[in-house]
Image (cartoon, helix red, strand yellow):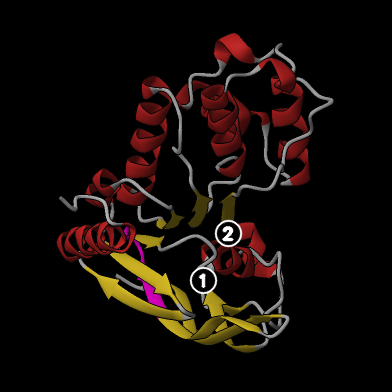
């Protein structure tokens, strides 16, 4: 499998704080790369850099063999779902899909395909303000995949969602990976999510440690135990 995302010695500072300190990793075709860690560890910062939302101080980032510091052509290969609002709240669901399809220069067939895949048929005339969290996230995912991306960048894609919406989104991520796509998925909790990932990176103190899903589960347990000891939970 060829490398789709390459990050080398990435450094980012916010004020005097080093958020990312010489972070390096690669993500290949068909791979789901998870990123987790404590609050404020730099997960969202990392995703925003990959998406081209934030500039970075030092290092090199390549997506689909394109240096993101030198060209924006890589954006055509991205699908993005972040914590920042990215949909148009004054438009209805169907209008959002049509408008974003026009921005991405994709045809009507792409819109119809994501409506079917993300089960949005019953919501097309709904205003965004009337959507439940799961419906809104399905729409966000559908918009991200309108352009048949090669890389999905996801920030908490199924956090606090209803079971059906989580099932639909997980199914589509799995199908995307089976087709050779690559996914970078940031999350803050839920050891059960590890089963959906090929490798998992723990971010803390600016550094990165990469685990297998099984190793990540053990690290999660260690962190929970450490927090319990610090807080005195479990003491007799």
Q: Main secondary structure of the magenta part?
A: strand
Q: What x and y, as percent, mark residue 49?
A: 62, 70
In this picture, is 137 found above or below 210?
A: above
- Which corner quadrant holds the N terminus? bottom left
In this picture, is 172 found above or below 228?
A: above
> Is residue 111 at all visible to an observer of this figure?
yes
Q: Residue 179 versus residue 227: which sits nearer the camera?
A: 227
Horizontal placement of 38 versus 193: left or right?
right
Total marks in image: 2
State the SS at label 1. loop
The residue wearing badge 2 is: 77
Q: Is residue 98 magenta?
A: no
Mark 2, Cα crowd under 10 Å, few <14 / some 14-19 / many 20+, is some
Label 1 vs 2, first from the N-terminus: 1
Magenta residue span: 25-32
Q: Residue 19 versus residue 117: which sits nearer the camera?
A: 19
In this picture, is 129 found above or below 84?
A: above
Q: Residue at x 51, y 71 (%)?
A: 64
Mark 1, Cα crowd under 10 Å, few <14 / some 14-19 / many 20+, is many
Q: What x and y, as percent, mark residue 113?
A: 53, 28
The residue wearing badge 1 is: 64
Horizontal placement of 225 versus 138: left or right?
left
- Gap between marks 1 and 2, in whole Å? 8 Å
């Amino acid at each position: 499998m060829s490398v789709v995302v390459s990050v080398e010695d990435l450094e980012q500072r916010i004020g005097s704080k080093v958020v990312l300190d010489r972070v390096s990793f690669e993500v290949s075709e068909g791979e789901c790369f998870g990123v987790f860690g404590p609050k404020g560890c730099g997960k969202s910062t990392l995703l925003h850099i990959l998406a081209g939302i934030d500039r970075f101080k030092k290092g090199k980032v390549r997506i689909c063999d394109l240096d993101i510091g030198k060209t924006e052509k890589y954006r055509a290969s991205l699908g993005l779902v972040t914590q920042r609002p990215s949909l148009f709240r004054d438009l209805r669901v169907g209008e959002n899909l049509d408008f974003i399809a026009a921005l991405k220069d994709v045809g009507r067939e792409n819109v119809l395909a994501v409506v079917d895949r993300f089960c949005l048929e019953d919501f097309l005339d709904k205003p965004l303000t009337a959507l439940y969290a799961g419906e809104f996230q399905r729409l966000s995912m559908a918009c991200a995949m309108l352009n048949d991306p090669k890389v999905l960048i996801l920030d908490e894609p199924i956090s606090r969602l209803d079971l059906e919406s989580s099932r639909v989104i997980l199914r589509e991520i799995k199908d995307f990976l089976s087709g050779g796509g690559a996914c970078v998925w940031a999350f803050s909790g839920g050891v059960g999510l590890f089963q959906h990932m090929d490798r998992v990176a723990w971010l803390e103190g600016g550094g990165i440690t990469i685990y297998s899903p099984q190793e990540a589960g053990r690290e999660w347990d260690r962190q929970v135990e450490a927090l319990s000891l610090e807080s005195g939970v479990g003491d007799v």
